[in-house]
Amino acid sequence: MFLMDILVIADYFFLIFHTLLILFNLFAWLWKPLQRWHFIVISLTFASWFILGIWYGWGYCPITDWHWDVLREKGVQDLPNSYITYLIQRYFGADLSPDLVEYATVGFAFIALVASIKVNFFSKKKA
């Protein structure tokens, strides 16, 4: 019983933390005090997807991996490949095309990365 309580807490921790991290990656470039942090975090995200992805599979995220471990321990099966697909299913009960979700995820993340590069390195400084 104690292990199941810990797994439930871990599940909610990852659900909240990972969702907030995704929202940070998408929108933190908008707020000046977070712009530098945003660039670091989204760069690490892309490094995970494309560098760690060489060894672990394209789009690899260690946070997803850890959350999947928790969910499997809870007995959850048939987890999707994409964490965003999982969030859409869990939060909204929608079953969208995995390809659509994957392309949208990469597309929106790329837009956020380009925006972060722009605000961090190409914005005019006001005198």
Image (cartoon, rainbow, N blue to C red):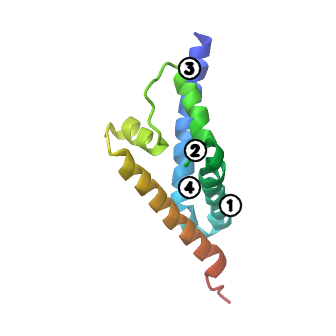
State if disc 2 and disc 4 touch (CB < 8 Å): no
User: Where, by quadrant of the figure, is residue 40 drawn?
Assistant: bottom right
Q: Which residue is mark 1?
A: 40
Q: Which residue is mark 2?
A: 57
Disc 4 residue type?
Answer: Phe
Mark 4–mark 1 distance (CA, rounded to whole Å)? 11 Å
Tell me: residue 126, above or below residue 24: below
| Furthest residue toward top | 1
Mark 4–mark 3 distance (CA, rounded to whole Å)? 28 Å
Q: Which residue is mark 4?
A: 24
SS assignment at label 3:
helix
Disc 3 residue type?
Answer: Glu
Tell me the number on the disc at residue 73.
3
Q: Which residue lies at the image location 63% right of the left edge and 50% below the top edge?
A: 48
Disc 1 residue type?
Answer: Ile
Lower position in the chain sequence, tag 3 or tag 2:
2
Lower position in the chain sequence, tag 2 or tag 1:
1
